Structure formats: structure tokens, C-alpha cells
Image (cartoon, rainbow, N blue to C red):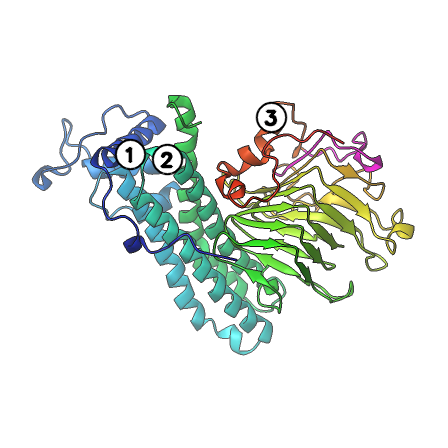
Amino acid sequence: MSGDDGLNSAEKKKRRIAVLGVSSLMLIAMIAAVAIGIKDIGKKSHDSDHAGEDDHGDLSTSTKSVQSLCQTTDYRQTCLKSLSHTNTSDPKELIKSGFEAAMEKIKGALENSKTIKAAKDDPRTSGALEECQIVMEYAVTDLKRSVDQIGDFEFSKLDEYVENLRVWLSGALTFQESCIDAFENTTGNAGDEMKKLLNVSQQLTTNGLGMTTQISTLLKTLDIPGFGDLGRLLSEKPAIMGSNFIAKDIGFENSAGAEKHQAVALLVQSDMSIFYNCHMDGFKDTLYAHSHRQFYRHCSISGTVDFILGNAVAVFQNCRLIFRKPLETQSLTITAQGRINEKEPTGFVLQNCTIVSDPAYFPIRQKNKAYLGTPWKQFSRTIFMHSFLDDAIAPEGWKPWMGTFGEDTCFFSEYDNRGPGSEQSNRVKWTGIKKLNATEIKGFTPAKFFGDDKWIWSSQVPYEPGMILAQ
């Protein structure tokens, strides 16, 4: 069954306890202040006649607040421009305005994309534009959820709200990137035009992610108690959206053979989705774990090239990953994780999984080597922990994407795995290969990685929130 966590703020509580509202406002204001070292930000401009005046005739309070908030963003000038017409010094309202600006830019790109003339001459470009229009609507939905979450901020739920914002903003960023990916195999300059249309909205979404991440980082320093490719999208296949989807004892299969290109068996965009005792069978790109929080327990996933891909916050626990026979000259890769910004909370964690070869692939496994993953996007992040790796895994472990792309910026790690393929002495020597200690690896256990795992506990699906020792 599937549900939705409610995107319409009108359906939510219309009033909050006054002290909680004031507390959350003060906290966010304090965070903005700490970020750039401003000591006095509690004041608001009550008299517009004096806007622009202080002891030295400097900028207005609202302008100072905008500059303060934008100071720590990746795209400062874009941030300043988007908030230049706001008339408030309330950091919460400024952050909302930033989200809304990104949403409007995406809507503008969606409208302007209809005027790209190349679509009339190239069926692939036309298809890519259609896909863009779909995923940009999804991006707007994630930004709308983020705006509503800021509006409903409660101090008592701050940790949960911050994590929701990071996931949804990451989703919005991923949907925009997926739109651009759709043009990879098209002709003409339509892809470049779309990239230009989405440039500002991507920058604004990245800025929003940075602001939200800053909140989480600063909470730790403040020591407050209690807080510690889109051509694939429109092909005929199951697509899971909405929120809180749960699947048990079901199979998903794409019957396209190894000679086909992308052949997704299952696309998942559902936030807080759970798959238990399910089978996903295909060849290339079997499971597209596209975005949001996803948990897989005791599932079987088979494929050849990048058969688990996407940019979800995804944990695969006690799963069986099966290499299938590829084309004659193909090598195999399990993961192609798509994190595009280092502030995103996304990544793949494979915990206590078993990686094996099927009977058809087994005789050629030494000729057609297999790899744990490849840096599909710049900040790709994948962790294999306490898993069994069979001898099909190449000694190098990880496969380059294109040239040296992502090798210095990815985050790939192996921890306490077992089996003949787990030997790490001949692994690639990229900067992005991380050796985690016993304390650091705990940050990638499900309870820590998801931030809030109540949605898993309530499902009554078997679940281990912490470390699972090697069997």
C-alpha cells in the first residue's frame, strides 16, 4: 500500500503553541547569526522610514539578514539576487523565499522548455523534453514540501524536520539533474538550452540544501540537548511514487535481454519506502533507486551493468545481489550512485549482503570481471559493510566512469567484508576511497544514516538499526 504525507499545508494544523513558534524562530535566527559571526540579529525593522540607517548609515536590517544568510551558500550572488526584493529579516521567511524562488525558476524552465524548436525535428529530443516536464513537476513537489515544512517548523521536531528538508531538497536537485541527463543521446543543442534554463534553479536548490545542512552542523556545535537518466523514466515499468510505500513478497522483472540498453525493472521515488522479500530482475539498470529514503530487506536484485543506480538515501540489508551473464565484451558493476552535491544526505549502504554469480555468468567471471561500483556523479557515495563478496569482484574493486571523473570526490568504502572478493590490497588508489574506522562506520548504520527510522519500525518488517557482525 502507499500513502502520502500531505503536501497541502491547509490540511495541517493551523495554529501552533506560541512558545514553540517563537522558540523555533529564535533558534533559526541564532543559527544564521552563528554561521557568520553576527552577535545582534534579534532586531527587526519596525520602522520603514529608517530602513537603510544605522550608526554608520549602513544597510537595512533586512538587507543585512539576506547577506548573512547568503554568506555560507555555494552560489552567493544567486542567493543575494533571489532575496534582494524581500522585506523581512526573519531567517525562516528568507529560507522559505529561497525555496520559493527555486520553485518559480523550475516552473519558468518548464514553460520555456516548450519553445525549444529542436524537439520538432528530433524524436529523441521530443521524448527528452516530455521526460523533463514530468520530473520538473516532481522537483516542484519536493520544493513545495520543503516550503510547507519551514512554515510548520516546531522546535520539538527540529531534528526530524531538518532531515526531511535535506532529503526533499536533494530529491529536487536529483530530478533537475535527471532532466539534463535525458538529453545525453539527443542531437542538436536542446540539452545545452535546457541546462541553461535550469542553471539558476539548480543553484538555488543547492543553496537551500547548504542552508539546511548548516542548521544541522551548528546544532552539534551549540550542544542543544535532545538533538543529536531519465530516458529510463518513461519506459514501461513499475514506478513507485508518493510516500510510505511498502512491498512484500513481490517480484519486478524487465525481460529485455543483455543486448538492450537501459532496461529498468523498477523505479522508486517514494519517500520512506520499504521492500521486504522482493525480487528485482533485469540486466542493465535493474533497480533505479532514484530519490528519497528507501529500505530494502532480504531482497534479491540481479543484473549486469549498474544494476542498482540513483540518488536515494538507500540501505540494502541482508540482500542478495546476483551477477548475470553480460554481453561478450561487457564488465559488470553493481552500483552507480548519483550524488551531485557533497551536502546531500544520499548514498547507498549495502549491509550484510551476499554478492554472487548466477550459473550462466559463473564460467566467464574471470574474463568479464565485476566491480562494486562506479562514480556516476561527482560526489557518488557507496559503502559495502559486513557483506560477502565472491571471486567475480575484480581486484581493483571499483571501476572508473569516464577518465578520472569523480575519483577524487566520490566516497567509496568497504568495511569488514568477507569472501574471496573482499581482499583490498590491490584496490584502486583514488582519493575517494575511504578507510573508515569502527566509530566512523557507525554513521552508515541504518538508524544513523536515515536520521529517523520510526517509519521502518512501524512497518514491522525485520530490521537491524545498528551494526551486523560478519557471519
Q: Which residue is mark 2?
A: 158
Residue shown at the point (14%, 32%) measured from the top left: 57
Give the main secondary structure of the magenta stretch.
Answer: loop
Taking depth in this image into account, of 463 and 18 the one nearest to the observer is 463
> Is 444 displayed left or right of 215 in the figure?
right
Q: Nearer the viewer, mark 2 or mark 3?
A: 2
Proximity of marks 2 and 1: CB atoms separated by less than 8 Å: yes
The image shows residue 162, relative to residue 202, as above or below, that is above
Neighbor class of circle 3 (other Cα within 10 Å; few <14, some 14-19, many 20+) is few
> Residue 39, percent across and down?
26, 23
Camera-side residue of 410 and 282:
282
Query: Distance between the Cα atoms at labels 2 and 3?
Result: 24 Å
Which residue does the numbered mark 3 point to in the structure image? 440
Secondary structure, mark 2, is helix
Query: Is 116 colored magenta in this rendering?
Result: no
Lower sequence index among marks 3 and 1: 1
Q: Which residues are magenta?
A: 409-430
Q: CA distance from mark 3 to mark 1?
A: 31 Å
Q: Tag 3, which secondary structure?
A: helix
The amino acid at mark 1 is Ser
Q: Is residue 262 visible?
A: no
Disc 3 residue type? Glu
User: For this rendering, which residue is in front, 113 or 103?
Assistant: 103
| Residue with the mark numbered 1 | 24
On screen, 460 above or below 4? above
**Of the image marks 2 and 3, the number of the one nearer the N terminus:** 2
Query: Does the stretch in magenta take in 424?
Result: yes
Say how many tags the image has: 3
